[in-house]
Amino acid sequence: MKKILITGAAGFLGSHLCDRFVKEGFHVIAMDNLITGDLKNIEHLFKLENFEFYHHDVTKFVHVPGKLDYILHFASPASPIDYLKIPIQTLKVGSLGTHNLLGLAKEKKARILIASTSEVYGDPLVHPQNEEYYGNVNTIGPRGVYDEAKRFQESITMAYHTYHGVETRIVRIFNTYGPRMRLNDGRVVPAFIGQALRGEDLTIFGDGLQTRSFCYVDDQVEGIYRLLFSDYIYPVNIGNPDEITIKDFAEEIVKLTGTHQKVIYKPLPTDDPLQRQPDISRAKEILDWEPRFDRSEGMKLTLDYFKGFSEEELQKSEHRDFS
Ligand code: UDP
């Protein structure tokens, strides 16, 4: 049985990856320090023989006994609210954490895939963003701790490939949504859904004309799965190119929830990218991958998940903004 270590396993993407690899017959070692992750996301796997959980912070030396075939490094705060609150941890997990996991991959002769992000493109001056674009990042802005950690992560990953021959893969993840997002992580999908379900106004930051392109989690997981088993070592964008303004997205949520909410406008957070859309030509060509879920289908599945929350849980996760 092949063994895979998944870091950030109790988080949104990490937990869906655990599900997928368990289903594919792997022995999964799930690792998380639970700063932003939640055991609820993986507790259904605890009873399985091919699943183990290690409560560990990957910025400290990572020890895994025995053989290891694959590593997926998905540990990191991943929402602006989180990296404003824990900027040092964000920098450390992308740098020190990645260094530890690359060292582990070298030691075990394991293949490692690291989770990078569209944030390496910063507030992009090229549209849509392809993998050749070097980005436009403010190193000292509030997003700098995440963006630069992820850029460093890509560099050290390539260096381990070049100098130590480690088998590496790099995915650049664009906005992804679905069940198990944290209701209060500040990201626009859970923020708007939470507000609608609590009967609050939807908060649009800025004029709402900034764009994002939202990928459903199952599509993201499929792209990552294919990349891991490909032989391609350079970064690959995985995301859904269907671009929408945040204003139009708010209207879609109001219609979808049938809650007749009003929208209100708040200041745009510093360095909030104005446009974002992945160019996925490389993923299409190399992985024969493209998204299957359109937004209406994916959002319905996501809303169904959040409808399962009790009134109390919904109230507890009251939305916070940047203003
Ligand atoms: N946003 C918003 N209202 C909210 C939360 C987010 O208008 O309550 C905006 C945010 O300013 C950004 C977009 O939605 O322009 C996506 O934000 P998110 O935090 O989900 O992701 P990111 O900015 O990292 O793409």
Image (cartoon, grey):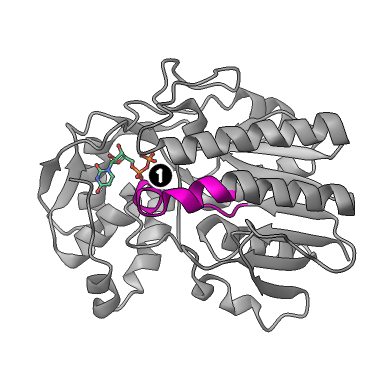
Residue 87 belongs to magenta span: yes
**Tag 1 residue:** 295
Residue 78 visible, this angle: no
Quick one: quadrant of the N terminus?
Answer: bottom right
Q: Secondary structure at mark 1?
A: helix
Q: Amino acid at mark 1?
A: Arg
Residue 148 pos. (x, y %): 51, 34
| Residue 52, position as x, y percentages in the image | 72, 75
Of the four image quadrants, the one with ligand 1 is top left
- Residue shown at 58% from the left, 72% from the top: 42
Q: In x, y percent, where is residue 229?
A: 79, 43
Instruction: Report x, y in % for residue 17.
Output: 64, 58
Nearer to the camera, 19 or 101: 101
- The stretch drawn in magenta includes residue 145: no
Judged left or right of residue 284, residue 299 is left
Q: Is mark 1 within 8 Å of ligand 1?
A: no
Question: Image check: 266 left or right of 110?
Answer: left
Q: Nearer the viewer, residue 257 or 142?
A: 142
Q: Which one is in front, 308 or 160?
A: 160
Magenta part of the chain: 74-93
Residue displayed at 67% across by 44% down: 114
